Amino acid sequence: MGWPVKPEQSALIRILRDQEQVITRAQAMDCGLSRSEIRHRIRPGGPWQRLLPGVYLAVTGTPTQRQTEIAALCRAGAGSVLTGIAALRHHGVRAPDSPFCTVLVPAEQHRQCCGFVRVWPTTRMPVFVFTDGAVRFAEAARAVADAARELGSFREVRAVAADAMQRRRCRLDELSGELGHAPVRQSAWLRRALAEVADGVRSVAEGDLRDVIRAHRLPPPVFNARLYSGRDFLAVADAWWPEAGVVVEVDSREWHLSPQDWERTLRRSTRMGALGINVMHVTPQRIRTEAAIVAAEIRSALEAGRARPRLAVRTLPAAG
C-alpha cells in the first residue's frame, strides 16, 4: 500500500504538469516549498534550473521553445499574451527565428524586460486570445503588426505579412486596422507592405518583382489579376499587362505550398498560352540577382505584345 500524497505535493504535481515543468517561485511556495528548498533544487547539479528571476524549470537540460514561452508568460504575470514572432509560430506563419519572446501586458501592470523576455505594456490588450495549453497568444493580425516592430528589414516584414494572408490567418482589413494603432515611426515597413498588398501583391517574391518593375520604369501590371475567356475562368496571373497580353509568373516552390499547387501553376500557364498570352516564367533568385536582365526581357515582351491586336481576355482585379 502506497503512502498518500499530501495536498501540497498534489498541487505541485498538477502545476508542473499543466505548465510543462515550468513553475514560479510564488507557485512553488504556495505548494509548501520554502525558499531554502527551492535554492537547494536549483543548485548546480540539482534537479531544477533557473530560467528567469523567480521562474524555474523542474527538469535539467535545454528548455523547449514552449517551455521558454510559458516561462515568459509566467514572468510577465497574469493576463500576459505572446505577440509578434513568438505568436506567429503558433499561427503557422513563417517568420525568422528570434531568441526573444515578446509579451503584451496591461499598461498598469509594471513588468520589466528580462533575459529573453521583451515586455510591451499596452492600453490595447488583444480582445481575442488564443490558447494552446499554458501558452496564450494574440490573434494573427496583431501578431503581424507587432512582429513588424521586431524584424530587421522590410523584406522580412513583407514576407511575414504576405505569408499570413496567403495562409488566410488574417485579412488585409484586419492588418490595416492594426496599422492604425501602431506607432508611426515603427510601422513604415508594414505600411509599405500593405500598400503592395492593396496593389494585388500576395507574396514576397511578387513584392521583389514589383520593386524591379518600378526601379526600371516599366508600366505597372495588374498583380494577381483574375483572367477570363468569355465567361470561363482562365487563371490568376502573378503579373498581367492586358494591353500587351503578357503575363509574368514567379515560379517558386516556396510560395506554392504543395506539389499539387505547382502542377496547377503549370497547367494554367498552358491554358493562357493556348489563347495567345505570352507567359514568361522567372524565379525569385533571378529577380533578386538578375534584375536588369529580367526587366529588359519584360520590356521586350511588352513592346512585341503592343504590336499585335489586343487579346480578348477579360480582367478582374485581385480578390481581396
Image (cartoon, rainbow, N blue to C red):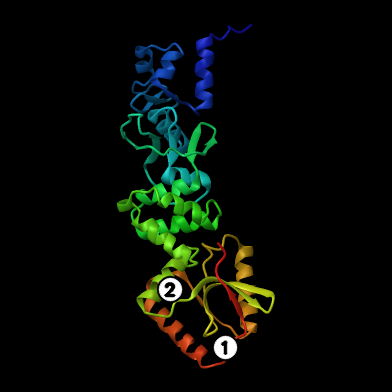
Q: Is residue 39 visible?
A: yes
Crowding around mark 2 (Cα neighbors within 10 Å: few <14, some 14 to 19, many 20+) is some
Front-most of residues 274 and 78: 78
**Three-letter residue code for mark 2:** Arg
Q: Which corner quadrant of the image does residue 154 belong to?
A: bottom left
Q: Is residue 96 visible?
A: no
Q: Outermost residue, bottom direction?
A: 307
- At a point 49% along the width and 34% down the height, the residue shown is 135
Figure check: 159 above or below 48: below
Figure check: 191 above or below 219: above
Q: Which mark is residue 310?
A: 1
Residue 148 is left or right of residue 7, and the answer is: left
Residue 268 is left or right of residue 224, and the answer is: right
- At a point 64% along the width and 69% down the height, the residue shown is 264
In whole angstroms, how far apart are the C-alphas of marks 2 and 1?
29 Å
Front-most of residues 293 and 145: 145
Q: Disc 2 marks which residue? A: 286
Q: Position of residue 42 (x, y in %)?
A: 36, 21
Figure check: 298 above or below 175: below
Crowding around mark 1 (Cα neighbors within 10 Å: few <14, some 14 to 19, many 20+) is few
Quarter containing the N terminus: top right
